[in-house]
Amino acid sequence: MLGMLLAALDQTIVSTALPTIVADLGGANHLSWVVTAYLLAETIMTVLIGKFGDLFGRKKAFLVSVVLFLVGSFFSGWAHSMLWLIVFRAVQGLGGGGLMVTSSAVIADVVPLRERGKYQGVIGAMFGVATVAGPLLGGLFVDHLSWRWAFYVNIPLGVVVVLVAAVALPSVRAEGRPRIDYLGILLIALASTGLTLVTSWGGTEYAWTSPTILGMAVASVVLLVLFVVVERRAAEPMLPMRLFRSRVFTVASVLSFVVGFAMLGGITYLPTYLQRVQGASATESGLRMLPLVVGLLLTSLASGVVISRTGRYKVFPLAGSLVMALGLYLLSRLDAGTGFWVTSGYMVVLGLGLGCCMQVPTIVVQNTSDYEDLGVATSGVSFLRTLGSSFGVAVFGTIFSNQLPAVPSVPSYVDAIQTMFLVAAPVGLLSFVVALFLKEVPLRDATKAVAARSSGFSEPGSGNSRQELERVVASLWRGQKSDPGPGILARSGVQLSYAQAWLLVQIYRHSTESGSTTLQDLSADFNVPAGIFHPTAAHLTTTGHLTEADGHYTFTGEGTDTFARLVGAWRVWLLESLAEEPRDRDYTACVDEIAAQLISNSRGMSTARHAVGSLS
């Protein structure tokens, strides 16, 4: 969680430090790339790292991500030119992207499915905290130490993460060898970088009609076309083109891109206005960004609750887009005389609009995707949001830089900020038009559970359908008001008490390769005397579910059949909650495995264990 927090913080921590960095290093026309380089590298790495974790083990992938992040952090703080700062921000972004994805995967390795929903809530909170704390911490470091400490602060914390991870994390590697779409990833990386350079350099470094800009634009478009061609033929494409046959996915993707564009675009440059025009210190500018973040958090949380209760979601991106457009327009009216409360009010409006739109794309995509596409569809939406953020920072920065003279004054900064937000305001209107085409489909119970417990912030999608389905089920399980186990046991038709069924499941779970286990194995796992389990185990032996020899309990045919019926009952409950019918072997196998996890780790474990004890 600490590693994920560090990665999320570094998306926004430099925003309040940017004016000071430019004053120290120069290169104001490259200002946007301090943020954009991090975001682009992070975007690319989130696609790669999940596959690398499957190939080489998630522990190794996690440790490599932390090391990359530390190297990037150290040399970003050490940089003495804008060029080197941008280069090492990209290295830091590679590590940050890896941390976000592998942190979640590692948690899945060490936390039982029944408990994972709690951790998912903390993960979302981490991103919310990072969005709030990033600008504030950046300002504190600038005012009281140096802007370099916005990067150096990661080093001691990162070292702690490396040491703990090296000792404590288990080495887990996925079965099979996934195919990595290297060519597709390379093409989209080059195309994204090229288009970002066009938007960043156009009108600043080079004229819009210069051969450099025109050539780069044409090359980027060609790369995008090649990317589409490659993805249509790749064995395991990074972003399958078939997804765009779904109008829901296409609309959700565009919405996700626009939200990322507007959010970080606005957050990145407002501190410059607050410092250069309103005379706020770096710390004060961080504090004065809080109204935007508070507005964002309020509507992202509220929209999740309303969506979970009503199952209706289309109204939020529609209303949010209009409010977002209004917020961007109001910010274009900022000038040297705008007061604190008025500025804060304008920021709240933008935040309220953004929050309405943030989580809807992910909810919709998870609700409508088939199992085989669940992973790539979820990661595709989060990929496009981060890509939108990098474009937003670049485009906002280009407009901002184009309005500033070589020696900027306060009125020139006012003119730049007004022009930047006025040009950006139509983005909200575009989002509204796109949202009109969003199809509203009934939400599954599991999707409602995800919406109810979502903060609007989440780590990037893993690209793995199994992991995404487990994430959905974990949210569903966390939302249960009571243990569904007794009801599911009754529906199964198994003639056992809940305590007896629980012990049967635990013996199955603890059975070794030879197919047997001892009560001492259970006692060690649950830290209770083995004798507590003996009467119930003896009853299961009497009923023909188990056989016992020299203290080793082995399943009979009757016991195996009973266990299968229990898993089947849980499987039916899962399918009803997911509102899906089994379609293929992979999906069926995945649901069966998840059902087995839930039955082995059900919330009623302690209750059943006490019931077992009472029988003695």
Image (cartoon, grey):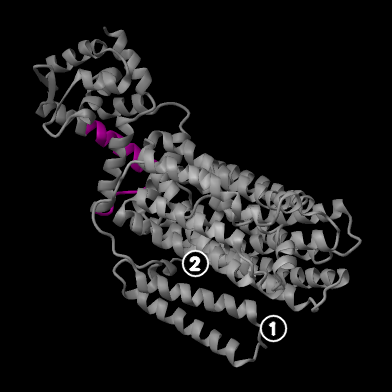
Callout 2, which amino acid? Thr
Q: Residues within 10 Å of mark 1 (few under 14, many from 20)?
A: some
Estimate the x, y position of residue 203 in percent, counting from the top left: 69, 83
Residue 72 left/right relative to 545 = right
- Within the magenta stretch, is there residue 502? no
In this rendering, the answer to whether 86 lies above or below 458 is below
Residue 451 left/right relative to 571 = right
Q: Label 1: state its secondary structure.
A: loop
- Answer yes or no: is residue 605 visible: yes
In this rendering, the answer to whether 581 lies above or below 252 is above
- Checking the image for residue 6, the label placed there is none
**In this figure, which residue is indicated by the disc labeled 1?**
203
Callout 1, which amino acid? Gly
Foreground of the two, 127 or 173: 173
Residue 358 left/right relative to 182 = right
Residue found at x 35% / y 29%: 602
Residue found at x 22% / y 24%: 504
- Within the magenta stretch, is there residue 572? yes
Which of pointers 2 and 1 indicates the residue nearer the eye?
1
- Residue placed farthest to the right in the image? 337
Residue found at x 71% / y 72%: 28
Q: Label 2: state its secondary structure.
A: helix
Estimate the x, y position of residue 255 in percent, counting from the top left: 57, 63
Separation of marks 2 and 1 at Cα, in angstroms: 31 Å
- Residue placed farthest to the top in the image? 616
**In this figure, which residue is indicated by the disc labeled 2?**
250
Estimate the x, y position of residue 32 in percent, counting from the top left: 65, 69
- Answer yes or no: is residue 96 visible: no
Pointers 2 and 1 in contact (C-beta within 8 Å): no
The magenta stretch spans which residues? 565-584
Q: Earlier in the sequence, mark 2 or mark 1?
A: 1
